[in-house]
Image (cartoon, rainbow, N blue to C red):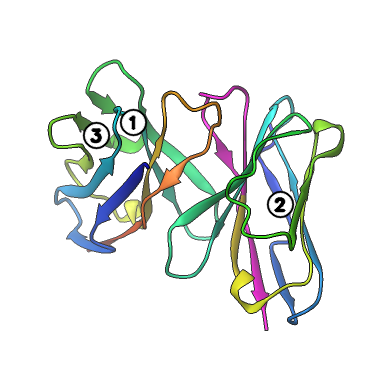
Amino acid sequence: EAGVTQFPSHSVIEKGQTVTLRCDPISGHDNLYWYRRVMGKEIKFLLHFVKESKQDESGMPNNRFLAERTGGTYSTLKVQPAELEDSGVYFCASGRGLVDEQYFGPGTRLTVT
Amino acid sequence: AQSVTQLGSHVSVSEGALVLLRCNYSSSVPPYLFWYVQYPNQGLQLLLKYTSAATLVKGINGFEAEFKKSETSFHLTKPSAHMSDAAEYFCAVRGRSSNTGKLIFGQGTTLQVKP
């Protein structure tokens, strides 16, 4: 069984540009999560999809962040326009049910200069 | 609001020594509790979890953790450290009554194992 994959692994962009991160969950996992870790800080929850619906988006920092999960398969997280404080590692995780284990991807390291 | 505190951002032990990583939580109702490990350039991997059964939870790679409600703690231990245990460890909680799988993480503890 393939694990959670994320693309790209690294992204370096300039302030004001747009970046789109992609997450492919484990096949059959209805629940998909995005988390972020800013350097030196704890990992923080961004949002939770159940299939294609946003179950909880309480962690989204502001309206520059847009997450989608069309068709309930892969998900994208777009940052537009990017700011310096958006730099960090973005993790995606997926799970079968709400209380089941969350399987994490390797993360995308985003650097905004 | 729930929160998690991991005492010590860096812990160093000698190979073969006891590993003790501390985690305290704050929650009005005992939550689900998790320990994750992250090896370099990899995603987080679940070590163990506490739901509501036995308070002593055994996980992978010889790790275990004990839930102590009176101390609001969920410390991670391993009797004998191996070099391969060097990694970053995260304690996390999830609310029982929540309708979301949102995990709240501690700050992480980097474990160094010296030969």
What amino acid type should be assigned to the residue bearing mark 2? Gln
Where is mark 1, residue-wise?
Answer: B59
Instruction: Specify few, some or many for label 1: CA neighbours under 10 Å numbering under 14, 14-19, or 20 or more.
Output: some
Q: Position of residue A33 (x, y in %)?
A: 63, 41
Given contact means CB atoms under 8 Å apart, are the residues at marks 3 and 1 in contact?
yes
Range of residues picked out in magenta? A92-113
User: Was residue A111 drawn as part of the magenta stretch in this picture?
Assistant: yes
* Upstream in sequence: badge 3 or badge 1: 1
Whether discs 3 and 1 lie on one chain: the answer is yes
x 37%, y 42%: residue: B1
User: Was residue A47 drawn as part of the magenta stretch in this picture?
Assistant: no
Whether discs 2 and 1 lie on one chain: the answer is no
Where is mark 3, residue-wise?
Answer: B65
Q: Position of residue A99 (x, y in %)?
A: 51, 24
Label 3 and label 1: CA atoms lie apart by: 8 Å
x 79%, y 32%: residue: A52
Q: Which mark is residue A6?
A: 2
Location of residue A4 with respect to A16 vertically, above or below: above
What amino acid type should be assigned to the residue bearing mark 3? Ala
Chain containing mark 3: B
Chain containing mark 1: B
